[in-house]
Amino acid sequence: MSVTDELLANAEQYAATFEKGDLPLPPARKIAILACMDARLNPYGLLGLSEGDAHVIRNAGGVVTDDEIRSLSISQRLLGTEEIVLIHHTDCGMLTFTDDEFKRSIQDETGIKPEWAAEAFPDVDEDVRQSLARIKASPFIPRKESVRGFVYEVETGKLREVV
Amino acid sequence: MSVTDELLANAEQYAATFEKGDLPLPPARKIAILACMDARLNPYGLLGLSEGDAHVIRNAGGVVTDDEIRSLSISQRLLGTEEIVLIHHTDCGMLTFTDDEFKRSIQDETGIKPEWAAEAFPDVDEDVRQSLARIKASPFIPRKESVRGFVYEVETGKLREVV
């Protein structure tokens, strides 16, 4: 039995007791969370989110590329969110390599060098500030009054704001 | 008090009872979930995921662009995941507009036309197949033995596989 099959069995349990079939499309709390994909970072548990509350956008590092600008733009312009929370974290995989190394290893194996940046970073606080700066610089995100960045400490469960 | 401040208060509660400070960086279940950012879709509740289990990647639509190829490539190549689950859903915001309309409205308001695709789609099953096809076509994702796509029904809580 694959892990996918095990998760599908869990999904059947979820549907069996499901009672939230009438939630509206726009997020009730009018907020978008942009966080790293890391397995130890659970935005629902950490922030007390429930179904219907918030858009949750995630990728390797919690970085801001064109695709996050796309998602945040759709979130604010079409679905009414007004606040943004960015979450990076300690012990991140993105701290363990460089773009050059990663892309060289792929080129050596496949013969093709990725045309995209891997977005590795040497300092997590600095990269939160980088992500904040990219959002502030984007002409496509209309609401920037409440854009705040945090580091989640996987060792302690605490969330620390980057200022 | 902003919604962000309310979520930060929840985060203090989370940290107060936190007991998972020794989880390893690589996901225990060796799986990556790629899902839409929609507020009604909670991958933790739906799939029974806990802290440490899985990478969770999300964006508007749950689509596959270069940034998702980047995240999945890092997930598999550096952190050992072997399976991929894609989740789109019914009543998706991406079904309610076209790229041309969305980009025109931004251009009219800001004077700048986004250089990225908005990735809107007219049919959710078709777009799950599109996402599967983009992953299968990528030279940068090494493990493709278990890549499966699903539609989550926000009305019923059920997960339906797209074949």
Image (tube, coloured by chain):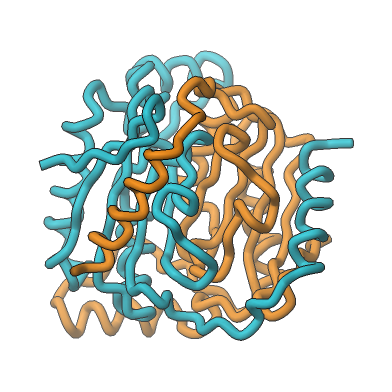
Chain colours: A cyan, B orange
Kindly tell me whether residue B76 is visible in this rendering.
Answer: yes
Front position in the image: B17 or A63: B17
Residue B162 left/right relative to A48: right
Against B106, residue A71 (above or below) is above
**Where the N terminus of chain A falls, by quadrant?**
top right
- Please tell me which residue lies in front, B94 or B112: B94
* Residue B156 image point, x, y percent: 74, 77
Which residue shows up at 48% across the image and 54% down it?
A: A44
Q: Percent from the top left, x then y, of residue A67?
A: 38, 55
Q: Is residue B66 above or below residue A98?
A: below
Residue B56 placement (x, y as % from top left):
54, 45
| Residue B70 in view in this figure | no
Which residue is pictured at 18% across the width and 71% down the height? Answer: A143
The residue located at (22%, 78%) in the rendering is B107
- Residue in the image at 51% along x and 47% along y: B57
How many numbered badges does the structure rendering display? Answer: 0
Looking at the rendering, in which quadrant would you find the C terminus of chain A?
Answer: top left
